[in-house]
């Protein structure tokens, strides 16, 4: 169970012959992810860690059944790789690549919507359903199987918080990174809806940061529709100065909008438990789940 | 990347959008020459890449060439909003009938571009949005269809124009959209777009911000990212080394891997009563070289009293980071106190390397942040 990826996921890797693609293919195979093929134009016929490589996604799908892809292609070529995957009918598209221009990201999302495909990223660490499937670059050892669904705009901060959850005996159903860019494929609202339907998820952690209004929209959704499962959140960037990009292209306070204070107030008003420190997320969820911690 | 006004205007002009007649001047005498060539009242405008320039005294009107020279003298080599003015744009003054606003930007939540129009040009659009939201017209652009001539006509008609003038204005909007797409903008803005007393439209002020991630398609501007101008030595070095760095005002230098982790490290420091000196993200899979470069940057900031390195090893290996720290220490011979937090991949090896060199390593981020603040307070 979990959302978007599980033990039935069969994935291809686009950009499998590159340094990053090849390295993470090995780690994903070690984890147990079923990777059926790789794609790099011009490298068809090769094998990477015994995974056969094809020139196009269509060629790969003629030989192998697959329903997901993970993209490690450099930014100038990644938009084409994503559109190729969507057009070939893959329904889960994870884009690890960072520094894709916003204009291209907008095109990718519009085409994905038309084809009913889910895009995770760009500029995401990917997605993991512990013990079932990892399509990403995250260190698997900090995650453990359990009931907390987690969605995050950050990478290492997610690992930090997942490690804290695991240490408290709170495993995860699925953890995914929305991506650090201004335009990404998933919003907190869309992920909240998926977690609400997922039987293995009993509580949700949202890890946000400054910039944009994904967090505010999530609060509006929770307030309006109600949410059956307990939610905790952490927002990074309380001390970030306005107008400066804090590492992520999307982490910027513009014209007074997108501050951490705004987001925290909205979350609290919606009844979400807001953690002051990353380490507090596990404590808040443990309390909300009325679970004996020690 | 924010372009200067004169650069933005020359791009708008290339696309057939009327802008005021004018020229750039680097010396006051040049400003005088431009003003006498224009042979009319002029505006002398400081060329700096920040907003609120008018309010800060960066725009001076002049009725004669001599006044233009005086105005240029007041602006060139002076600081406006903390930025030194290298040159001024000397432009004909426009006779204003009406001031409009037009902008193209990204709507993150809708995953599309949005064309924003307003009858209230001349002030900041955020201010209009806050005070008179009904005066803002937003047209979301379907990415698969684009911004079409009928969208432009609808906007112009809603602002009360008809006939030739409506078509003329709609044409300008369509050109602005084309320019915005061609230049991969985060923001293209005409504010104000002036309707003159004789019925023309002129983009009296324009702004262009290009998406940094698209600069590879705009080599002319890409070079500028690592040009010396307007960057501190630390910022310049960070760009050259491919590190994300933001200067802040405190005394605790911060290095970490991952934007979210570093941001929350800054937050923790402040929560415990300290002040961070900077944001520095070494990124994923940081090599010992990158780590050494990061330390050099942070340590070259004279305001830094303590360095806090917060690494969560995933793809990044803690032993690599530890070697980078020792390498930087050897190269620069720095003596400032350091607090190191290592967790994750090869943590034990990393800890060993540093402990052997007499550097203490902590496991928890909260504990480490507390320790860094404690050292600063004890020292100060």
Image (cartoon, coloured by chain):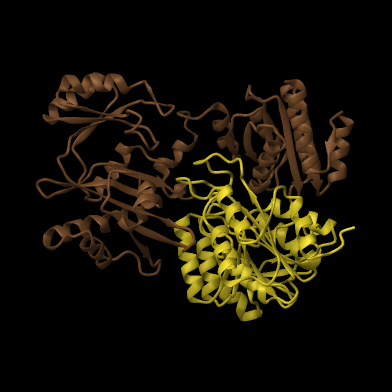
Chain colours: A yellow, B brown
Residue B335 percent location from the top left of the image: 76, 21
Residue A4 visible in rendering: no
The N terminus of chain A, quarter of image: bottom right
Judge whether B138 appears above or below B81 on screen: below
- Where is residue A55, by image quadrant? bottom right
User: Observer-nearest residue: A138 or A236?
Assistant: A236
User: Observer-nearest residue: A290 or B292?
Assistant: A290
Q: Residue at x 84, y 56 (%)?
A: A167
Residue B5 visible in rendering: yes
The C terminus of chain A, quarter of image: bottom right
- Say whether residue B196 is left or right of residue B207: left
Q: Residue at x 35, y 65 (%)?
A: B146
Residue A180 percent location from the top left of the image: 58, 54
- Where is residue B143, by image quadrant? bottom left
User: Observer-nearest residue: B353 or B177?
Assistant: B177
Q: Residue at x 31, y 43 (%)?
A: B123
């Amino acid at each position: 169970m979990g959302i978007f990826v599980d033990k039935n996921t069969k994935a291809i890797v686009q950009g499998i012959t590159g340094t990053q693609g090849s390295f993470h293919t090995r780690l994903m195979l070690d984890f147990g992810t079923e990777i059926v093929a790789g794609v790099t134009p011009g490298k068809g016929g090769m094998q990477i860690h015994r995974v056969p490589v094809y020139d196009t996604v269509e060629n790969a799908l003629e030989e192998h059944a697959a329903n997901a892809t993970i993209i490690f292609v450099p930014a100038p070529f990644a938009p084409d790789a994503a559109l190729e995957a969507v057009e070939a009918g893959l329904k889960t598209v994870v884009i690890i690549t960072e520094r894709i221009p916003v204009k291209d990201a907008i095109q990718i999302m519009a085409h994905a919507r038309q084809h009913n495909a889910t895009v995770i990223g760009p500029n995401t660490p990917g997605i993991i359903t512990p013990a079932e499937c990892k399509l990403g670059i995250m260190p698997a050892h900090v995650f453990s199987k359990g009931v907390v669904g987690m969605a995050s705009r950050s990478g290492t901060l997610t690992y930090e918080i997942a490690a804290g959850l695991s240490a408290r005996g709170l495993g995860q159903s699925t953890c995914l990174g929305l991506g650090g860019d201004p335009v990404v494929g998933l919003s907190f609202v869309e992920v909240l809806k998926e977690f609400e339907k997922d039987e293995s998820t009993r509580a949700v952690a949202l890890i946000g940061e400054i910039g944009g209004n994904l967090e505010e929209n999530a609060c509006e959704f929770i307030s309006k529709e109600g949410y059956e499962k307990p939610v905790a959140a952490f927002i990074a960037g309380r001390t970030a100065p306005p107008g400066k990009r804090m590492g992520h292209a999307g982490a910027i306070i513009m014209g007074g909008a997108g501050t951490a204070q705004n987001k925290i107030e909205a979350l609290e008003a919606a009844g979400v438990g807001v953690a002051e420190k990353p380490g507090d997320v596990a404590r808040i969820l443990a309390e909300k789940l009325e679970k004996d911690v020690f | 990347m924010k372009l200067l006004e004169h650069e933005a205007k020359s791009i708008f002009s290339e696309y057939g959008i009327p802008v005021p007649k004018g020229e750039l001047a680097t010396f006051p005498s040049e400003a005088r020459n431009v003003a006498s060539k224009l042979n009319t009242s002029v505006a002398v405008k400081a060329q700096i890449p920040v907003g609120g320039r008018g309010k800060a005294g960066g725009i001076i009107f002049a009725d004669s060439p001599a006044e233009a020279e005086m105005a240029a003298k007041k602006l060139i080599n002076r600081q406006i909003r903390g930025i030194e003015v290298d040159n001024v744009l000397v432009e004909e003054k426009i006779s204003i009938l009406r001031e409009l606003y037009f902008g193209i930007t990204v709507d993150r939540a809708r995953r599309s571009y949005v064309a924003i129009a307003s009858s209230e040009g001349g002030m900041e659009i955020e201010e209009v949005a806050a005070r008179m939201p009904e005066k803002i017209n937003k047209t979301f652009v379907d990415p698969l269809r684009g911004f079409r001539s009928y969208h432009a006509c609808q906007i112009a008609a809603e602002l009360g124009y008809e006939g030739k003038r409506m078509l003329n204005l709609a044409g300008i909007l369509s050109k602005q959209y084309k320019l915005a797409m061609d230049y991969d903008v985060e923001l293209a803005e005409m504010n104000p777009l002036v309707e003159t007393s004789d019925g023309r439209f002129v983009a009296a002020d324009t702004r262009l911000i290009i998406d940094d991630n698209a600069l590879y398609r705009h080599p002319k501007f890409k070079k500028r990212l690592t040009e010396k101008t307007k960057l501190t030595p630390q910022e310049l070095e960070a760009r050259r080394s491919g590190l994300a760095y933001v200067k802040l005002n405190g005394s605790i230098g911060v290095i970490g891997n991952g934007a979210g982790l570093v941001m929350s490290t800054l937050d923790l420091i402040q929560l415990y009563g300290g002040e961070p000196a900077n944001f520095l993200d070494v990124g994923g899979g940081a090599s010992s070289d990158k780590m050494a470069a990061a330390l050099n940057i942070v340590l070259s900031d004279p305001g830094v009293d303590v360095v806090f390195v917060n690494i969560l090893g995933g793809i990044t290996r803690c032993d690599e980071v530890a070697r980078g720290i020792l390498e930087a220490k050897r190269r620069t011979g720095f003596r400032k106190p350091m607090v190191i937090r290592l967790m994750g991949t090869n943590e034990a090896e990393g800890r060993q390397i540093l402990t052997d060199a007499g550097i203490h390593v902590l496991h928890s981020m909260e504990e480490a942040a507390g320790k860094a603040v404690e050292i600063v307070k004890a020292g100060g």
